[in-house]
Image (spheres, rainbow, N blue to C red):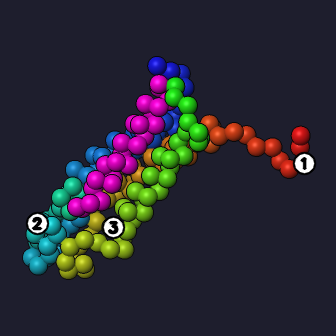
Amino acid sequence: MHFHELDRGELMAVGGGLVLALSLLLSWFTLGNAHAVLNGCRGPNATCSGWRSLSVVRWLLLLTAVAPLILTWIILRGHGLSWPRGELTAITALCALTLILFRGVIDKPGAPRGQISVAVGWWTALFGGLLILVGSVWRSQESAGRRKPPGVL
């Protein structure tokens, strides 16, 4: 095990993964009135967790939460990669952030959409996704090969 190769980037990404996984258990959406319905959750003034309100997206977010742990395992074991470490985790974090923003801002689940608003779990997922992204970008910049400017031998 190569614990000395871990840096702040991995630890930040792992923390973001744990925050993202935990956010699925928190309330993501608040239902406003008695007519609001969201995958079995009914208003008025009710909340619905991310796990209960997101059918397919919950699995994708859970896979994204596991990605930093896989990166950490690769680093601890000393496996060689053909790409900079953290690059694939950054891509999965960008995809997860896109899904989080899409489901929370653009296309909220449930009906009527005007009575569904985001709650603390959505904000927590957004924060966790950003932590994964920043940590993995940090790691990919440190492990990428240094390029020379044009004209330098």
Residue 3 visible to an observer of this rendering: no
In the image, residue 34 sits, relative to residue 75, either above or below, namely below
Q: CA distance from mark 3 to mark 1?
A: 48 Å
Contact between marks 2 and 1 (CB within 8 A): the answer is: no
Determine the main secondary structure of the stretch shown in magenta. helix
Q: CA distance from mark 3 to mark 2?
A: 18 Å
Earlier in the chain: of badge 3 and badge 2, it is: 2
In the image, residue 1 sits, relative to residue 148, either above or below, namely above
Q: Secondary structure at mark 2?
A: loop
Horizontal arrangement in the rendering, residue 108 relative to residue 42 (left or right): right
Residue 15 appears at what percent x and percent y?
A: 40, 39
Q: Is residue 137 magenta?
A: no
Earlier in the chain: of badge 3 and badge 1, it is: 3
- Disc 1 marks which amino acid? Gly
Compare residues 120 and 152 and report the one nearer the observer: 152
Q: Is residue 58 magenta?
A: yes
Q: CA distance from mark 2 to mark 1?
A: 64 Å
Q: Secondary structure at mark 3?
A: helix
Numbered tag placed on residue 104 in the rendering: 3
Residue 81 appears at what percent x and percent y?
A: 56, 36
On the image, numbered disc 2 is attached to which residue?
A: 40
Q: Which residues are magenta?
A: 54-77
